[in-house]
Amino acid sequence: MAKELSKINEINVKKRKMMYLSMGTTDMELYLQSLMGLMMLPMANNAFQLMEKTLLYEFRDEYQRQLDDLGIDKPLSTAKMQELSHQAFDNKKPVNAFWQSFDKILANLSIELIKAVQQGVSAKDWAKIVGGR
């Protein structure tokens, strides 16, 4: 069973390679942009969740430190800390700043890969770029 699946996968990879090689430059550009978005989105979501937790923890720790220094005993709810830790700074909310940066990174990476395609990457190198062997 595993051997049959392996053969089927190998055949599909070969078909996919041939399809990519027959694409025009414009199709390759569109494909690359889509591929980069799909490949990087899970990483960006993980990084975004990490950023959100870090903002919350940093705010909570600093708030607690200041309360201790001032001798005040007035805790905030987690929801209020979440809200305050995400306030705009320099007219940018951290959430917006993160996704704007991600969009710029994705656009620049796509442009670099598109340049490689336009400059005539070999069929073998192109197959490696799109996930072949």
Image: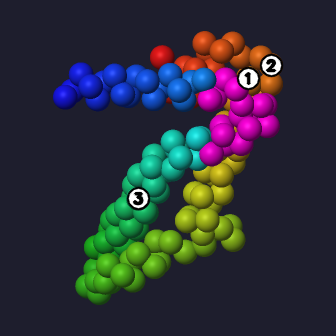
Residue at 55% across, 20% down? 128
Instruction: Estimate how packed mark 1 is, as few (under 14), some (14 to 19) or many (20 or more) residues with alpha carbons within 10 Å.
Output: few
> Which residue, given by chain and number where applicable, does mark 3 sit on?
49
Q: In front here: 67 or 101?
A: 101
From mark 3 to mark 2, how far is it between C-alphas?
Answer: 37 Å
Which quadrant of the view contains residue 73? bottom left
For the magenta stretch, what is the residue range? 19-34
Which quadrant of the view contains residue 74? bottom left
Number of marks drawn: 3
> Which residue, given by chain and number where applicable, does mark 1 sit on?
116
Q: Secondary structure at mark 1?
A: helix
> Which residue, given by chain and number where applicable, does mark 2 sit on?
119
**C-beta proximity under 8 Å, tags 2 and 1:** yes
Residue 122 visible to an observer of this rendering: yes
Left or right, 48 with reference to 101? left
Q: Position of residue 81 (x, y in %)?
A: 39, 77
Kind of residue at disc 2:
Gln
Q: Position of residue 116 (x, y in %)?
A: 73, 23
Which quadrant of the view contains residue 83? bottom left
From mark 1 to mark 3, how far is it between C-alphas?
Answer: 33 Å
Kind of residue at disc 3:
Gln
Q: Secondary structure at mark 2?
A: loop
Mark 3 or mark 2: whose residue is earlier in sequence? 3
The magenta stretch spans residue 119: no
- Give the answer, above or below, for where 12 lies relative to 60: above
Q: Considering the image in quadrants, where does the N terminus appear?
A: top left
**Residue mark closest to the camera, 1 vs 3:** 1
Q: Secondary structure at mark 3?
A: helix
Mark 1 or mark 3: whose residue is earlier in sequence? 3
Q: Position of residue 122 (x, y in %)?
A: 69, 13
**Residue mark closest to the camera, 3 vs 2:** 2
- Give the answer, above or below, for where 49 lies relative to 11: below
